[in-house]
Each structure stands twice: as C-alpha cells, then as structure tokens.
Amino acid sequence: MKKIAVLVLCFLLVLNGAHVEARPHRRRPNYKLFVFGDSFVDIGNRGPTSQRIEISRQWYTPYGMSDPAHGNRATGRFSDGLVQSDFVAKILGRDESPPAVRLWHDDGREFTGLNFAVGGSSVYEEADAPCLRNQTEQLRSMVRNRYIDEEDLEDSVALVAVTGMRDYIGLTGVDTDDDLARFANSVTDKILDAVRRLQRMGVSKVLVDTMPALGCTPWRSWSTRYTRCDSRGNRLSDLHNTALRQKLGELDDVLLLDLNTIFNSIMSGSASSQQFHRTLAPCCEAWNPDSYCGLVDDRGTKQYNLCPDPANFFYWDFWHPTQAAWTAVMQVLEEPIKDFLGI
C-alpha cells in the first residue's frame, strides 16, 4: 500500500510539474532605445569638420584610444571609448548604442532604435546644434513619415541626458540663489516638456539623467590644480536636480538616473572609486581651460598632456568621463534600470 501511495504522489508531482511548465512565461520586452541629449551620449551626430577644431575634436586622436571594438580610434564619442548610451544599450542586451541618426539608413537589419543626441546641444534653441525639443521632433517626424513604425514605440525606452554644460556654462547676470533657482526651473521645464512629448508619442519608458556636480569637472577645478571642487558650480547642479526631482518624481514610467550622487560617491572615495587614482584631474589635459584635448599646432605638435592609462582617471577631458568611469557608474545603475524595465 505504501508503494502505491508513493507512486500516486510521484505521479501527482509530475503532473503538477508539467502544469507549471505549461504556464505561459511573461514576455520579455525587446526594447528599442532612443537617445536624446548632449555630448554625454552622442556617438557621432556632431559630425567631423575638414580641420581639427574644438567642436570636432571627438573625431581625432586621442579620442577613442581605449575602444578596441572600434579599432581604438575616434568614432565621434566624447571619451576615450564608450559613453553612457552604449552602456544603457548593453543593459538592454545590445553591443552598443543604436546608430546616430545622422548616419542611419534602413538597410533591412533589425531596428534597435536611434541616437538623436548631439554634442553641444542645449534645451534652448541654438544655431549650431538641435535643441532637446528639436531632437524629440526628429523622432516624431520619422514616425509620421513611416521611417519608424509606431509599433517600435510600444516597447521602447528613451534616455534623456542633459548635462547642463551648454545651458549653465558662461551664465552671466545670474548671481543670487533666487536667480539661479529661476534659471534652473526654466531648464528643467524644458526637460519635463521633452519627457511628456516622448510619452505622448508612445514611448513606454523614459530614463532621465540628473546633472553631475558641475563644480567637480576639471574645467571648474582647474584653478585649484584639481584639488577641490567649485562650490558655485555644485550649487547650480543642486538647484537643477532639486527642480528635476520635483517635476519628474511623480511621473509614471520615468526613472531618474542619479548621476550626481554616483559621481560624488566615487569622488569621495567609495569602494567603486579605488581604481581611480585621480578623480578631479583629466587624463587628457589641455594646457589651459580655453584649449582642448586633442589640439595640435600648425606643426602637428600636441598642445595637451595625456596620462599613461585612462582607466586610472575618472575624467577623460575637461568635461567628459572616461570609459572606465562610465563602466563604474553604469554598474551601479544596471540593477535599478533592469528592475524598472522588467528585464
């Protein structure tokens, strides 16, 4: 009798197991990625020029030197290698950022999204780069003209990366905290508008960067020989991020990527910062703040100093993180992004 009972129990377990296996699995979204913003995420929309100048330095040596996937050469990315949009794409299971819209054509391969970000762009209208609103309008136009299917937006994620470099640098006539707060409110209103526009188009999930500590960029810490951050620059970042959290914090399907806190944690000596021997100094150091990494004179002589190993530096140039820095930052953000996207 005991043998019969055991056999019956085993049979029921097998049936139950078969029943569990037969349950439909939750479909894992195959997200398309659409990228908007400035040089933190641009992968080539700011095109090359006939001669090396500051706005095209990302197409010249030594940019790209740490990127074996692209032959250790410059690709239009503002870093020694990959940038934030590449790492978000990797979290989605891709090898790198979707293509720059400037270079994209429908060649019949799987459509993974597009990168609309342009180095030097602003939230305001500028003559030399499409502003954030115009970047989102490019997506709307491509959907309207059927270059992109509306279905591609159903499982899509947008990355909105506004560092504030173009918006806050050289700010004049804005001195008091009230003045700064009003200006930050205006900038973040533009970001909020872009997020809402993307959601109305049908983009299902939106990732939005907070603004890193402006005062800790090498451009601001240069005057102290990279020994301390600039308090006014950091105050701007704090005001910007406070306004951004107030406006976006309650929106559904929006995740703030807190670059500010992560950058600050690394710079203050967290466990993830141990590889970085220098956190305020750039690996590729122009000889003065009005110069730039990659500058050469008429005889081809370098007008910059280059560190032996970018992996030991958090900043690549006066503004942009190294590939190693992006690796460390995005490792912190990977699980929150996966949880948010359900992947």
Image (cartoon, rainbow, N blue to C red):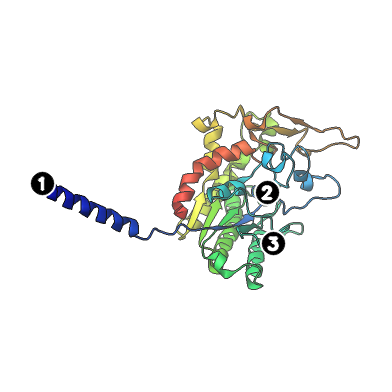
- 312 relative position to 332: left or right: right
**Label 3 crowding class (10 Å Cα cut-off): few <14, some 14-19, many 20+?**
few
Residue named by callout 2: 39
> Can residue 310 be spotted in the picture?
yes
Image coordinates for residue 29, horizontal then vertical, percent: 48, 58
Q: Real-space Cα distance between discs 3 and 2?
A: 26 Å
Q: Real-space Cα distance between discs 1 and 2?
A: 72 Å
> Can residue 319 be spotted in the picture?
no
> What SS does tag 3 mark?
loop
When the figure is inspected, residue 313 is found, relative to residue 100, above or below; the finding is above
When the figure is inspected, residue 331 is found, relative to residue 166, above or below; the finding is above
> What SS does tag 1 mark?
helix
Q: Which amino acid, by three-letter code, is at mark 3?
A: Asp
Image coordinates for residue 159, horizontal then vertical, percent: 57, 54
Front-lying residue, 144 or 320: 144
Residue named by callout 3: 107
Q: Which amino acid, by three-letter code, is at mark 2?
A: Ser
For the residues carrying marks 3 and 2, which lies nearer the camera in this image? 3
Q: Real-space Cα distance between discs 3 and 1?
A: 67 Å
Residue named by callout 1: 2
